[in-house]
Amino acid sequence: MSFIGFVIGVVAIVSGVCVVGLRNPLYSAFALVTNLLAMAGLYAALDAHFLAVSQVVVYAGAIMVLVLFVLMLLNLKSESGRKLGFIRSAVALVIGCVVLLSALPPVFARFAGMSEVTVSDNARDSEGTVKAIGQELYTKYVAQFELSSLVLLIGVVGAVMLSKRRSVTLQPRAGGLVGGSK
Amino acid sequence: MNSVLTYVALSMALFVIGAIGVCLRRNAIVVFMCIEMMLNAVNLAFVAFSKLHGNLDGQIAVFFVMVIAAAESAIGLAIILSVFRSVASVETTDAGELKW
């Protein structure tokens, strides 16, 4: 990993911790934007140029705009009343570290012997240019590509159905749960 | 140790951070963002192994994961919105009742 890759990796880790740790959901969202952009940089460092661009456009552009839109729409206060809880955080941190440290050695033992050069004799095959990705996508994976467009269509229809307002007035939560459904 | 494994280690770290966030946070939108982060961590592992093996299959998998993530974000946010309409909150602890 080059020096710039190391820096981008540190940015990704720090912004990921910020997503989890910051109280205000809006700050978490902006930390996630930083994280996604750092991931795009890592993709570019791994020669996946098309994925780097689509990461910026799809994730950091479209999906995060949607998330921020919902955040602004709901007009949430930061969860000030509820603390994360020191003990809960400590337990989660310990479990996370244990999982990470127990999962790393097997992976490293499995793949440490392989170097990129011996595995891929022709390194240019793995370069994810738009041309190469498109050729794979429209020849080998064309059925899956069409299916994915169907999934997107179902997603659009489902989102419209879910967020359609059925003549329901928003009632604030007072005492019990007042049903708004008709 | 080759450099691709460093990326795999990074992706594992990001995945664990996202999983901790899913367990710890109560705001449904933050949980949603942590899930996005976990998806991205897996994507990074896909790209790293695609580089290691010298073919494009991993990158194609990442492409499909992105498609699914886009559909998932549209539906997930719509679900969060409709839950907010009925309980007037996005805290996961407030949406505990199965029926009301």
Image (tube, grey):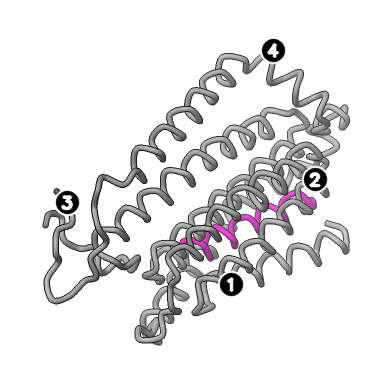
Circle 3 Cα neighbour tier, 10 Å, few/some/many (<14 / 14–19 / ≥20): few
Q: Give me the C-alpha separation between circle 2 and circle 3.
A: 51 Å
* Same-chain check, marks 4 and 3: yes
Q: Please tell me whether the stretch drawn in magenta is mainly helix, strand or loop.
A: helix
Between circles 4 and 2, the one closer to the viewer is: 4
Disc 1: which residue: A17
Q: Earlier in the sequence, mark 4 or mark 1?
A: 1
Disc 2: which residue: A46
Disc 4: which residue: A139
Disc 3: which residue: A181
Vertical position of residue A49 compared to residue A90: above or below = above
Q: Amino acid at mark 4?
A: Thr
Q: Position of residue B87 (x, y in %)?
A: 24, 64
- Of the pair B33 and A164, the residue shown nearer to us: A164
Q: Name the chain under label 3.
A: A
Provide the secondary structure element on which disc 1 rests.
Answer: helix
Q: Earlier in the sequence, mark 2 or mark 1?
A: 1
Q: Name the chain under label 1.
A: A
Task: Kindly indicate the quadrant of the structure image that contains residue A51.
Answer: top right
Report the span colored magenta.
B1-19
Q: Give me the C-alpha separation between circle 3 and circle 1.
A: 39 Å
